[in-house]
Image: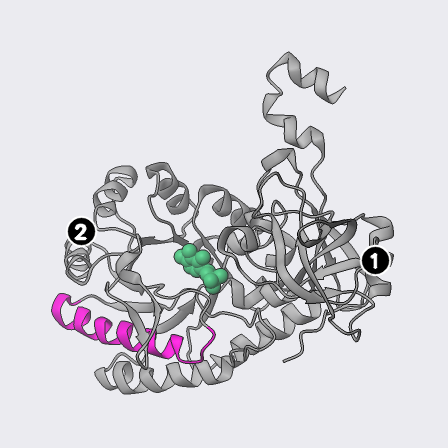
Amino acid sequence: MIKKPFTTKEKLEEIAAVYPTPFHIYDEEGIRKNAENLYKAFSWNKGFKEYFAVKATPNPFIINILREYGCGCDCSSVTELMLSKAIGAVGDDVMFSSNDTPADEFKYAADMGAIINLDDISHIAIVEKTLGKLPEKMSCRYNPGGYFTISNNIMDNPGDAKYGMTTEQLFEAFRILRSKGVKEFGIHAFLASNTVTNEYYPTLAKTLFEVAVKLRDETGADIKFINLSGGIGIPYRPEQEPNDIFEISKGVQKVYNDVLAKAGMGDVAIYTELGRFMLAPYGALVTRAINEKHTHKEYIGVDACAVNLMRPAMYGAYHHITVMGKEDAACDHKYDVTGSLCENNDKFAIDRMLPKIEMGDLIYIHDTGAHGFAMGYNYNGKLKSAEILLKSDKSFELIRRAETPADYFRTFDCFDFYKKVTE
Ligand SMILES: *Cc1c(COP(=O)(O)O)cnc(C)c1O
């Protein structure tokens, strides 16, 4: 597949004249179409709901677009809960799927009526102690251990993951929760990340559906929903095939009918907590070439750095790059495209074949709409960029301003030093 930017060089120059690079830009039209398709694909399931993984793109303007389609919020920290509450997502619109959870965050989640998804059996006692009484509806996170495989291919290694309860603990947790008055149950699992195959969800669903039937039979629990969580990936590389959400949903529907419906559990709602799939392709990091360096390798220095997009530095992740205005030019130059951090892993691309880059060229880094801006940090005193929404009518709107030095020094505001540095 040829990866194309969702906008033009002219448009980006128009935006950059108002909001200088670097910035993340999001494509409203693409976000809407994808959300609509997700709900269409799962319309066979009466209670279907996507809880958008807030951590992937914690921007209220973006999440509000998803809310229009019926999406709730999946939160993993108190600030994410606050964000959700501020945009009116409370009660059953919020799933609190955290781990290593501080007790007061359970309290905040319970106060706003969020569904608490327990990562560990030890949290039952903590929640009970913190709230005085368990909520009537609770969910448990499951980790069957071992490797997660699809047709003999290892997809991921849940046995090495810190999340979730073992099979034994899951059954024990359901028994304890029931004995303590919990009436409605959910099951959750996230066993493989960024999967680029239509088989991940159906394979995961089969495991969860079978466990659900056993849990009902052995503990008598009334299971209301099964949360397939995140993990549907996107084609970061041009040679990858995108997932087909309609095929994925069909696969889930088949095992739903074969396992759940057959066992008389045909009213269980399917939930998802997708982050990457909802937004990654509909965001890009736009930066400008500002330096070139010819030493042992050919380097292009841009005005963004790993602070704005950490995935390449952190996981060696591939992000496709388009040099704007040179979409059809031959990729006959080999570059390392770097940021300015004093860390040699601050490279958006290594040995990448690209068209000849001139200083001032706009560099479009694809697929940053999820786990992009959000992962940013402030190393080397670098500031986080603005976020801009390219609307369906092709107008643009600032949806988060860029950080300023005053923001960076803000946490010194109780010292005299703060005055000196900001004056
Ligand atoms: C990160 C996360 C997600 C979203 O994952 P994606 O890979 O973006 O789909 C969903 N649920 C939980 C609990 C998560 O931690």
331 sits to left or right of 412 = right
Question: What residue sits 48% from the left and 47% below the top?
Answer: 81
Q: Quadrant of residue 48?
A: bottom left
Magenta-colored span:
196-220
Instruction: Look at the numbered discs 2 and 1 and tell me whether their residues touch, using CB distance below 8 Å.
Output: no
- What secondary structure characterizes most of the magenta part? helix
**What residue sits 52% from the left and 76% below the top?**
39
Image location (x, y in percent) of residue 14: 87, 58
What is the three-letter code of the residue carrying label 1? Glu
Residue 59 visible here: no
Q: Is residue 317 magenta?
A: no
The x and y percentages for residue 61 are: 65, 54
Indicate the position of residue 134 as horizontal and vertical percent values. 26, 48
Distance from disc 2 to disc 1, alpha carbons, whole Å, reads 67 Å
Above or below: residue 139 compared with residue 272: above
Which residue is identified by label 1? 358
User: 93 and 143: which one is in front?
Assistant: 143
| Dot 2 amino acid type | Lys
Residue that label 2 marks: 180
**Among numbered discs 2 and 1, the one appearing first in the sequence:** 2
Which quarter holds ligand 1?
bottom left
Depth check, front residue: 197 or 333: 333
Residue at the location (67% across, 74% down)? 3
The answer to whether 201 appears left or right of 276 in the picture is left
Q: Is residue 355 above or below residue 114?
A: below
Q: Quadrant of the N terminus?
A: bottom right
Is residue 156 something one can see in this rendering? yes
Which colour assignment does the render follow? one colour
Considering every residue shown, the one lying at the far top of the view is: 416
Q: Residue 63's quadrant in the figure?
A: bottom right
